Image (tube, rainbow, N blue to C red):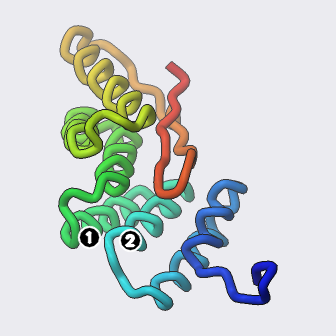
Amino acid sequence: MDANGKGVDGMTVGHRLMEAGEHELALKAYLRGAGETGINADVLSAIGSANLALGRLGQAESILKRALELDPNFVPALNNLGVVMMEQGKTGEARVYFQKAFALDSGQTDSIRENLMLAIAQSEASVYDPDQQQEDGGFRLVRQEKGKYVLLSDL
């Protein structure tokens, strides 16, 4: 409930819970939000992001791809799917998703630009250094603002 006694929508609650690191509760709130507003690219992107934060990469990937089926140009879903690909070690695929997100966003979002630069650096490093070892779990997904997440690396 807000100060006026009205219920807060599930999507807003989910975003707040993601910020607080309560990913399982956020997922439940996003599912409630889907029941309130219906299934759209934003809802699916949020559900996919919560699954990503919970380490459920396969689920996150399929849900984010469904979001892109509904809206192929939905920047948060493109960015988050890029994050999934990075987590799975698929830097080439991640780079494609980040490039499209970056182009559609006109390069205005710093987190997308940073994700793209990281994917480019890693994909080029693997071309030039075939012996390069990739560390598992070197990435973290952090929500920065409504519907926008940043991929952080230990590099």
Decide if residue 58 is on the left or right side of residue 145: left
Q: Is residue 55 visible?
A: no
The quadrant in which residue 21 appears is: bottom right
Could you say which is closer to the camera, residue 88 or residue 13?
Answer: 13
Residue kind at label 2, given as amino acid type: Leu
Q: Is residue 21 visible?
A: yes
Q: Give whichever of discs 1 and 2 has the lower sequence position.
A: 2
Decide if residue 151 is on the left or right side of residue 3: left
Could you say which is closer to the camera, residue 145 or residue 84?
Answer: 145
Which quadrant, please, contains the N terminus? bottom right
Q: Is residue 4 above or below residue 102?
A: below
Decide if residue 55 is on the left or right side of residue 107: right
Q: Which residue is mark 1?
A: 66
Q: Residue at x 48, y 90 (%)?
A: 35
Q: Residues within 10 Å of mark 1 (few under 14, many from 20)?
A: some
Which disc, if any, is residue 80? none
Q: Residue at x 32, y 44 (%)?
A: 82
Residue kind at label 1, given as amino acid type: Arg
Q: Which residue is mark 2?
A: 44
Q: Is residue 30 above or below residue 75?
A: below
Q: Secondary structure at mark 1?
A: helix
Could you say which is closer to the camera, residue 58 or residue 47?
Answer: 47
Callouts 1 and 2 close, C-beta under 8 Å:
yes
